[in-house]
Image (cartoon, rainbow, N blue to C red):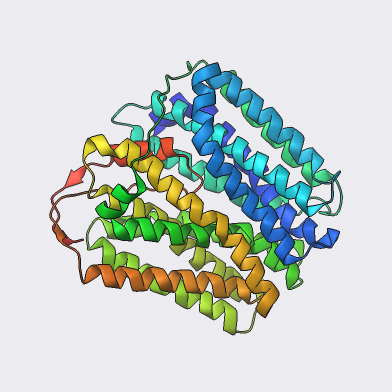
Amino acid sequence: MLTVLRNSWALLLGVMLLMLGNGIQGTLLGIRGKIEGFSAVEMSYVMSAYSAGFLLGSRFAPDMIRRVGHVRVFAALGSLISAILILFPIAPDWMAWAAMRAVIGFSFAGVYITAESWLNASASNETRGQALSAYMICQMIGIIAAQGLMNLRDPGGFDLFVISSILVSVAFTPILLSASPAPSFERITPLPIQHLFRTSPLGCVGLFLLGGVFSALFGMASVWGSEIGLSVKNISIFIGSIYLGGLVLQYPIGWVSDRQDRRSLIMVLSAAGAVVAFAGMILPWSMIFLASIAFFAGGIANPLYSLMVAYVNDYLESDQMAGASAGLLFIYGLGSIGGPLITGWLMALVGPSGFFLFIALLFTATALYALYRMSRGRVRLFRRRFRALSPTASAVAVEAAVEDAPKDGIAAGL
């Protein structure tokens, strides 16, 4: 790990600063939307636009990188993100916000692809797993720390938008001034969706449903908090707990996944997620209770993403992994677009509890489908080890993770 930090500290520092800026704006917009008088349905379009932009960016940013190079794309998209963050308080219209969020999502996809390409190129075969772990930890720490920064200024003013913009701008300095050469880049051609589904129905359906869980959980949490009247401090605690749970429980769940049937673990975790979400919907709310609900919801959802990728990876040949990583990210992205939209509609229909209701329904559907697949699947004698991943990662990190995961001979019904 010390070797990874010595070789990639500039990149990892830049990623942490990027996530600080992105973490602030994700939470801030949900709170500011309530101040501006936007409804939960209108804010759902704003939050969904990020996922749509990210999906488009994952598709088109690689072509931009091949045409003009990593450095130019990195600098151009970073400048665009920084500028748009300043525009949000100047244009208090939900449709304008949705358009700007789509552009930010597109830009962050390109930034992540560039950063992950650099990280992957700077790591050796022996250190790639450690580099990916360090990358994910830096992402999560950045987002958690961003929730603390939310309390420095009034969300009704300009200051937090300016702070977010400055953090994003400064994030590119250590990366662009580092001595590491820009890596070569080859466009990843996704495997056809029908091929992926035939290979792993549970992986495809699970990632689609999980995309809805993540985009609802992470995109609409601040909107939900504002709707029920939580203070900025309590909203930041709630959202920080989501990411803290994802960071803390990722590795224990990964350890278990390498030692038992992954489908049964997917089913158990999904069922536990449904119980947690239903508890959040029906039990009386206190801040300690809400922080606990957030911790376990995030602690289940985040490892489930890595677990789904590892499960699909069990059935892939080495030459299929690059295409599969891009295809899986596309499936996940499609699911994430609908998450905020349906959550906003449910909140308008049944009230704030619609936030937890949607998450509970998706977890339940995942658990039931896993149970169904367990009754029909085959036994896999060799499989690849679990690699921790963040749902914010691009196809570059997913590809590196699945290729780095070694096979072992533990027998398990998959």
Q: Position of residue 269 (x, y in %)?
A: 38, 68
Q: Position of residue 70 (x, y in %)?
A: 53, 21
Residue 291 is left or right of residue 273, and the answer is: right
Q: Nearer the viewer, residue 389 or 210?
A: 210
Q: Position of residue 392 (x, y in %)?
A: 51, 46
The C terminus - image quarter:
bottom left
Residue under the point 19% across and 44% down: 407
Please determine whether, in this image, residue 186 is positioned above or below residue 346: above
Q: Is residue 256 visible?
A: yes
Residue 46 is left or right of residue 372, and the answer is: right
Residue under the point 63% across and 24% down: 75
Query: Total marks drawn?
Result: 0
The N terminus - image quarter:
top left
Q: Position of residue 370 (x, y in %)?
A: 31, 68
Residue at the farthest bottom position: 283
Residue under the point 47% across and 32% down: 116
Res 327 → quadrant: top left
Res 54 → quadrant: top right
Residue under the point 58% across and 49% down: 51
Res 134 → quadrant: top left
Residue 66 is left or right of residue 232, and the answer is: left
Please determine whether, in this image, residue 289 is positioned above or below residue 403: below
Q: Nearer the viewer, residue 197 or 287?
A: 197
